Amino acid sequence: MESESAVTTCYRHPKVESHVRCTRCDRYICPNCMREAAVGHQCVECVKEGARSIRQARTAFGGRISTVPAVTYALIGLNVLAYVAELLRSSVVDRFAMLGAGLADSEGGHYFWDFPYPSSFHAEGLVDGEWYRLLTGAFLHLPPTEGTFGIAHIVMNMFALWNIGRIVEAQLGRVRYLALYLLSALGGSVLVLLIAPQEQTIGASGAIFGISAAYYVMARRVGADMAGVNRFMAGLLIWLLISAGLTSWQGHLGGLLAGGLVTAAYAYAPRDHRRTLIQASVCVGLLALLVILTVLKVSALRTGAV
């Protein structure tokens, strides 16, 4: 009497008969669990394990390669949303603009900082603990009918962010690019605080000057043709000088310096296992320095030492 041959089933679906084995783990797999491989088929788990073992492609500066500049799109979106909020409620600018120290009265009037100040006034800005202004001011822009530029303020900044940001993000990867943008914005705000604490400033220009500095540093590092890059940087510096009387040159310069420093760390860190640690350490170190300078300046303002 002949014995029946054993029925083999999928290791993930025991009720499904299977006669195909995974070429990697040799377990039986059903059609739902089969994944095409270079030779034969593999199971779902082996495909995932293989993907984890494959080294991810990186840019020249250590970032993950991505084809969609998602961070640049998100930053533009945040700036546009903030602008819409300004149009709907004008008080948004006074509430979230970068301001080191100022005074306000009960009727909503705003005045220059003076210490000590009368009891009929109250402090506003960083001296009143409004630390968020260091970053929120970098997402606001001039209302359409105010200032020298009006609506051109946000249009020019977003145009620059669209053109330069996509290039820089593609080279740095999303995480490094976002860190660069935020540290550049923060660097611009801190220099405004140190030099002109009573000035109310808004705009993404500090961050954009930072990513422009990154564009220059990266081009030099990879040995690109510098003719066009040098012309771009020359125009940027000329604009920095020309616009000094119309805009916050402190914010522009602060963003430029912060962005250049961060990108130098990205570009010249050794290309081995230490690279990410060194790059992150420089970013954290710069952040710590900016925080210390901010705390010292705000403390001096609060006590009337400056």
Image (cartoon, rainbow, N blue to C red):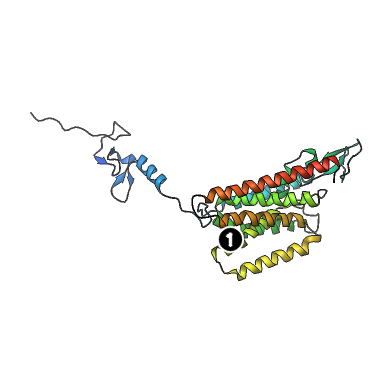
User: Can you say whether 281 is above or below 27 in the image?
Assistant: below
Asked which secondary structure carries label 1, the reply is: helix
Seen as rendered, the residue at the extreme bottom is 227
* Residue 92 as seen in the image, left or right of residue 233: right
Question: In this view of the protein, can residue 140 be seen by the observer?
Answer: no
User: Can you say whether 218 is above or below 124 in the image?
Assistant: below
In percent of the image, x 74 and y 62: which residue is there?
A: 240
Front residue of this view, candidates 83 and 252 = 252
In percent of the image, x 12 and y 30: which residue is there?
A: 3
Residue 88 point in image, percent of width and height: 75, 45
In percent of the image, x 62 and y 62: which residue is there?
A: 216
Question: What quarter of the picture does the N terminus occupy?
Answer: top left
* Kind of residue indicated by mark 1: Met
Residue 255 point in image, percent of width and height: 69, 54
Residue 237 point in image, percent of width and height: 71, 64
Q: Quadrant of residue 42?
A: top left
Seen as rendered, the residue at the extreme top is 1
* Residue 102 as seen in the image, left or right of residue 227: right
Disc 1 designates what residue? 218
Q: Quadrant of residue 244?
A: bottom right
